[in-house]
Amino acid sequence: QVQLQESGPGLVLPSQTLSLTCIVSGGSITANRDYWSWIRQPPGRGLEWIGYVSGSGSTYCGPPLKSRCSIDRDTSKNQFTLQLTSVTPEDTAVYFCARGDYELGYAYEKWGQGTQVTVSS
């Protein structure tokens, strides 16, 4: 059974870089038809899709955060990461990692529990 868990600091200063790691167990992030993704939910708002690293190693960040977003992976540790630069209080959110499963039509049926990240001075 695949499990995901987010790890990283809960407080980031404005203008600094938000760095998070998703620890994956029970499945390989190199599965080439899956998309290992980051999603966030700001307070009182809906989910916002951030981007992914695919099982083949390709990466993509969506237009809203593209200029500040970098997603990578460490296959030796079976982990993938998110870096978001030049953060502001508008980046305060619960951050989730999740798997887009090819076998389920890329549905995100496996999620981490989420981690609260607050951007504040």
Image (spheres, helix red, strand yellow):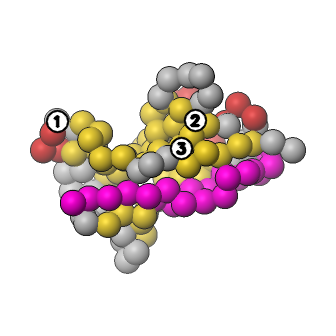
Q: Which mark is residue 105?
A: 1
- Tell me if label 3 and label 1 are in contact, CB under 8 Å: no
Q: Is residue 63 magenta?
A: no
Q: Which residues are magenta?
A: 1-22
Q: CA distance from mark 2 to mark 3?
A: 14 Å
Which of pointers 2 and 3 lies earlier in the amino acid sequence?
2
Q: Nearer the viewer, mark 1 or mark 2?
A: 1
Q: Amino acid type of disc 3?
A: Tyr
**Direction bottom: furthest residue:** 76
Which of pointers 1 and 2 lies earlier in the amino acid sequence?
2
Mark count: 3
Image quarter hosting the N terminus? bottom left
Q: CA distance from mark 3 to mark 1?
A: 23 Å
Q: Position of residue 5 (x, y in %)?
A: 44, 58
Residue at the spot of label 2: 65
Q: Residue at x 40, y 75 (%)?
A: 77
- Dot 3 falls on a residue whose secondary structure is strand
Q: Position of residue 58 (x, y in %)?
A: 35, 53
Residue at the spot of label 3: 95
Image quarter hosting the C terminus? top right
Q: Is residue 7 magenta?
A: yes
Q: Residues within 10 Å of mark 3 (few under 14, many from 20)?
A: many
- Tell me if label 2 and label 3 are in contact, CB under 8 Å: no
Q: Residue at x 30, y 47 (%)?
A: 110
